[in-house]
C-alpha cells in the first residue's frame, strides 16, 4: 500500500533535548510538508520541501530543523530552542509543488516531560 | 494576507440531521478552495474541492459551493451519520503559492 508513514506515534521530550520525528513516503511525491496542529488553531506550516536537497521555512520554523537527503524521507527535528513543543505533528506530501491534494500521515503526538 | 475562518465548534447533531459548517476566506484573486476531514487518530484527507467561482464540490454526500461574492465555501450534508464524526478543515490555495492554508477546524459529533 502506498502512503505516508510517521513514527513514532507518541514521543516524549526532556528539557534541553533534541528529538527527531520520522516521515517516509512511498508515493514518489516530489513535495513534502510538516505541519503543527494545536487545539483550536488548525494546522500551521513549519517547513516544506519541493524537491530533494531543498527546503523552505514555513510560518513557524523557529526551533525546528529539517533535511531532505532522499525523496522519500523528510525528518523533522524539534530542537531545545522550541520552548513550547507539545503538539500534534503531521507530515504530508503532494505529487508536485502547488498540487492541492495533500496526503497526510497519521501524526506524531509530542509531549514534554 | 490569505486566511480562512470557520465556525467554532464543537458541533453536535443527531443522526440524519442537516449539517452546515460555515467557511469564509480572505484572499486576492481566485484561490482554489477545499474541505479536508480528519477522523479520530488519523491524518487529514481531502474531502472535496472547487477551483473557480460557482463551482460545486461534492463527495460522500457532502457539498460546498464556491461563492466569490460572499467569499464563502460552506460545507453541507443533508443527513449526517455517526461515521461522519470528525474534524473538518476548510482550506485555500493560491495558484501562485506552493502551500495550502488551513482554517482552525470544526469538530463534529453525531449522536445516534
Image (spheres, coloured by chain):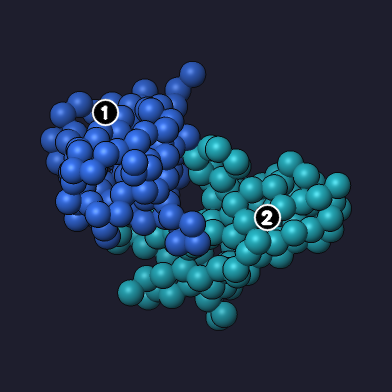
Chain colours: A blue, B cyan
State whether residue A7 appears in this view: yes
Q: Secondary structure at mark 2?
A: strand
Q: Which residue in the protein does label 2 denote?
A: B108
Q: How far apart are the alpha carbons under marks 1 and 2?
A: 33 Å
At which x and y percent is residue A64? Answer: 21, 47
Left or right of B112? Residue B36 is left
Left or right of B57? Residue B42 is left
Pointer 1 indicates a residue of which chain?
A
Location of residue A97 with respect to B2 vertically, above or below: above
Front in this rendered view, residue B15 or B25: B15
Q: Extreme left residue here? A: A53
Location of residue A34 with respect to B30 vertically, above or below: above
> What residue appears at the point 84 percent right and 51 percent down from the top-left corner?
B15
**Looking at the image, is mark 1 or mark 2 nearer the viewer?**
2
Location of residue B112 with respect to A73 vertically, above or below: below
Q: Quadrant of residue B73?
A: bottom right
Pointer 2 indicates a residue of which chain?
B
> What residue appears at the point 42 percent right and 33 percent down from the top-left corner?
A10
Q: Extreme top residue here? A: A1
> What residue appears at the point 43 percent right and 55 percent down from the top-left corner?
A38
Q: Which residue in the protein does label 1 denote?
A: A73
The N terminus of chain B, quarter of image: bottom left
Circle 1 Cα neighbour tier, 10 Å, few/some/many (<14 / 14–19 / ≥20): some
At which x and y percent is residue A107? Answer: 43, 37
Amino acid at each position: 500500500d502506498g502512503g505516508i508513514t510517521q513514527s513514532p506515534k507518541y514521543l516524549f521530550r526532556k528539557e534541553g533535548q533534541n528529538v527527531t520525528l520520522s516521515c517516509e513516503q512511498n508515493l514518489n511525491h516530489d513535495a513534502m510538508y510538516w505541519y503543527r496542529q494545536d487545539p483550536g488553531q488548525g494546522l500551521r506550516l513549519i517547513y516544506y520541501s519541493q524537491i530533494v536537497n531543498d527546503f523552505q521555512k514555513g510560518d513557524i520554523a523557529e526551533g525546528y530543523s529539517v533535511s531532505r537527503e532522499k525523496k522519500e524521507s523528510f525528518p523533522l527535528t524539534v530542537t531545545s530552542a522550541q520552548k513550547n513543543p507539545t503538539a500534534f505533528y503531521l507530515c504530508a506530501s503532494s505529487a508536485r509543488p502547488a498540487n492541492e491534494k495533500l496526503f497526510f500521515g497519521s501524526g506524531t503526538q509530542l509531549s514534554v516531560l | 494576507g490569505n486566511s480562512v475562518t470557520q465556525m467554532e465548534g464543537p458541533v453536535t447533531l443527531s443522526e440524519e440531521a442537516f449539517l452546515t459548517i460555515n467557511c469564509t476566506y480572505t484572499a486576492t484573486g481566485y484561490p482554489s478552495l477545499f474541505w479536508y476531514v480528519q477522523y479520530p487518530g488519523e491524518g487529514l484527507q481531502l474531502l472535496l474541492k472547487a477551483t473557480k467561482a460557482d463551482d460545486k464540490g461534492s463527495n460522500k454526500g457532502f457539498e460546498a459551493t464556491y461563492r466569490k461574492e460572499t467569499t464563502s465555501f460552506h460545507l453541507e450534508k443533508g443527513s449526517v451519520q455517526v461515521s461522519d464524526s470528525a474534524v473538518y478543515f476548510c482550506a485555500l490555495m493560491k495558484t501562485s503559492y506552493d502551500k495550502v492554508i488551513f482554517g482552525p477546524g470544526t469538530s463534529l459529533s453525531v449522536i445516534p
